[in-house]
Image: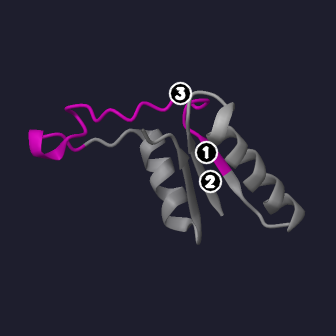
Amino acid sequence: MLIIYAHPNHKGHCGYTLKYLTQRLLDSKIKHELLDLYKLNYNPIISDKEHYTSGGDKVEEDTKNFQAKVKKAKNIVFIYLTW
């Protein structure tokens, strides 16, 4: 299972959800991986060199790595703040 966490901290509802989920997975001995996008300093902004309709065709290495993890994952959980 792949968990993608996109929140600047681990307090509040999102942090609680992450803690609860990971504890249940550990208790159930379910393998999982956490991608904490803020801790990884991931920049989600598409640059001109990546934007193919602007003539770009280069995908950043961290994005390629994330794409490979998403493609490989059988289950994905997204935890993020929605306002």
Residue at screen point 57% across, 28% down? 8
The kind of secondary structure element at disc 3 is loop
> Which residue carries the number 3 mark?
41
The reply to whether the C-beta atoms of the residues labelled 2 and 1 are less than 8 Å apart is: yes
How would you rate the neighbour count of disc 3 (Cα within 10 Å): few for under 14, some for 14-19, many for 20 or more?
Answer: few
As helix, strand or loop, the secondary structure at mark 2 comes to strand
Tell me which numbered mark, 2 or 1, is placed earlier along the sequence: 2
- In the rendered image, the quadrant that contains the C terminus is top left
Q: What amino acid is found at the position of numbered circle 3 in the picture? A: Asn
Q: Is residue 41 magenta?
A: yes
Q: Earlier in the sequence, mark 2 or mark 3?
A: 2
Type of the residue with mark 2: Ile
Residue 18: % across, % down: 69, 47
| Residue hosting label 1 | 35
Query: Which residue appears farthest toward the bottom when viewing the image?
Result: 74
**Is there CB contact under 8 Å for labels 3 and 1?**
no
* Residue at mark 2 to residue at mark 3: CA–CA distance: 16 Å
Farthest residue to the left: give it.
54
Q: Position of residue 11 (x, y in %)?
A: 69, 30
> With 73 as the anchor, is 24 left or right in this view?
right
Q: Is residue 32 above or below residue 75?
A: above
Which residue type carries mark 1?
A: Leu
User: In the image, residue 63 lies at what x, y percent?
Assistant: 43, 44
Q: For the point 76% across and 46% down, which residue is it?
A: 19
Q: Tag 1: Cα neighbours inside 10 Å, few (<14), some, or many (≥20)?
A: some
In primary-sequence order, the first of circles 3 and 1 is: 1
State the residue position of label 2.
3
The magenta stretch is: 34-57
Residue 44 lies in what quarter of the image?
top left
